Amino acid sequence: MHIKSSPVFGKNKVILRSTQRPVTPFGGLCVFFEFLHKIDFADAVNRFMPIKTVSPNAIEPSRIFASFLVSVVAGARRFAHTSIVRSDAVLLAMMGVNRFPCDDTIRNFFMKFGMGETQKFFEPLWRWMVKRVAIRAEGYSLDLDSTVFERYGKQEGALKGHNPKKHGRPSHHPILAVLAEAYFVLHAWMRSGNAGTARGVVEFLKETLALLPDGVFIRCLRADSGFFDNRLMGFLEERGLPYIVVARMTKTIKMKASGVKNWVRIDADYSVGEFRAKLHGWSVDRRFIVIRERIRESGSAVGRRLFDIPGYTFRVMVTSMSGEPSEIWRDYNKRGDMENRIKELKYDLAADDFCMRQFYATEAAFRSVLALFNLLGEFQRASGMGKWRQPATLRTEVFLCGAILGRKGHDLVVHLSESWGGLSRRNPLLEKVKAYIFPTSPKLDATPEIPAYAVA
């Protein structure tokens, strides 16, 4: 049976026919599956999975978890979208499973996660992932940030709070810690929408630092003004962990910033200065870096205007570091890349869209997407991609590839379409994944100096 279809341009008809051969648009995922096999992903998830099934016909929880990740890679933005891969026989063959779960099965899987199950599963899973992060002699930058997940309907923890886009809309307010140079989400909490930015940040950081493997240390913590909190800075100072935090422009800080006399000019628009201050409630005085920017007709200047000094905007940072003010300012500016990580999580992997009524079920789905983000980052390192690619870019450049399932004797064969780059484009990635050697601690003659926060 066939029908004829009219093209948009031209007069020749196009004949449409059905085929019984299994076809997939995601043949390029074979490279990602090879990477998951390389790191023993299935074995790790099976070992850490706290959810158990009793029915002999039930799909194993580890396979439900993996199927959810694959559906998100394929572009699912809702649980209902996970059916995008359910009838894909080619993906079934490449994953080595007999069937994919339906969207209700995936929802029910996450609904079994309470606070205990979430901790039992994701903590060891993160330790398993982070142990393969390469050791850097200079250490990593740890960037803190929070974001808003808008919610519709009635969900636990979805409360009215700070929402810059939709005022009054109930939301969740997660907090994240990212190893900047590794593109790795080290830790995250889902929080209720009415939580302040710095709420629970010290306890959050204790959990975050405990996840670091031997040899990996933090050279500097960077955060915006939402984390300008005396308790946080006191905790960092006790642990010997350097920090740069944007200061809130209180009346005292404005007065101190306007009183700076010794400005060091960086260029025609920027100058830096510094002062020390002990604010109300503080037990010590701290170092503040001031960035003065000339207001220009074109472009918007970052910072706040001070009425005492017209023509400029000011930005103030508090730091425990001893470098030159201009170096500290440039160091903090690199934290802007954190916003890109949050956008990738939202727009490429739909981290804010998988929501259920139960709070911990929502958190489990959220942290599953974060785990996928980290796996995609490690996949890029293992496959030799020198430049960071967003998840959506990986999807279009590598994972999207028309493929047909066939057989050769007793073996299954996946035919990758040459019009999508075929095997010739993906074979170099496959070879690098197979030959990849995981980072290990360097063999040193002397015992390395251990940061104070690592043993506190």
Image: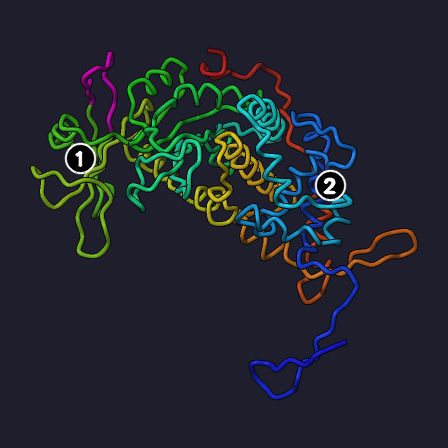
**What x and y, as percent, mark residue 293?**
20, 43
Please tell me whether residue 18 is drawn above or below residue 107 in the rendered image.
below
Tell me: 106 left or right of 240.
right
Q: Please give the residue where the numbered disc 1 appears in the rendered image.
A: 263
Q: Nearer the viewer, residue 303 or 7?
A: 7
Packing grade of label 2 (10 A; few <14, some 14-19, many >=20) is few
Tell me: 454 left or right of 240.
right
Sooner in the amino-acid sequence: mark 1 or mark 2: 1
Query: Is 279 within the magenta?
Result: yes
Q: Please give the residue where the numbered disc 2 appears in the rendered image.
A: 435
Residue 405's image quarter? Answer: bottom right
Name the colouring of the figure: rainbow
Image quarter hosting the N terminus: bottom right
SS under mark 2: helix
Tell me: 182 left or right of 175.
right
Please tell me whether residue 447 is drawn above or below residue 392 in the rendered image.
above
Q: Nearer the viewer, residue 56 or 378?
A: 56
**What x and y, as percent, mark residue 58?**
73, 36
Residue 7's image quarter? Answer: bottom right
Packing grade of label 1 (10 A; few <14, some 14-19, many >=20) is some
Which stretch did the figure color magenta? 276-288
Q: Nearer the viewer, residue 267 or 390?
A: 390
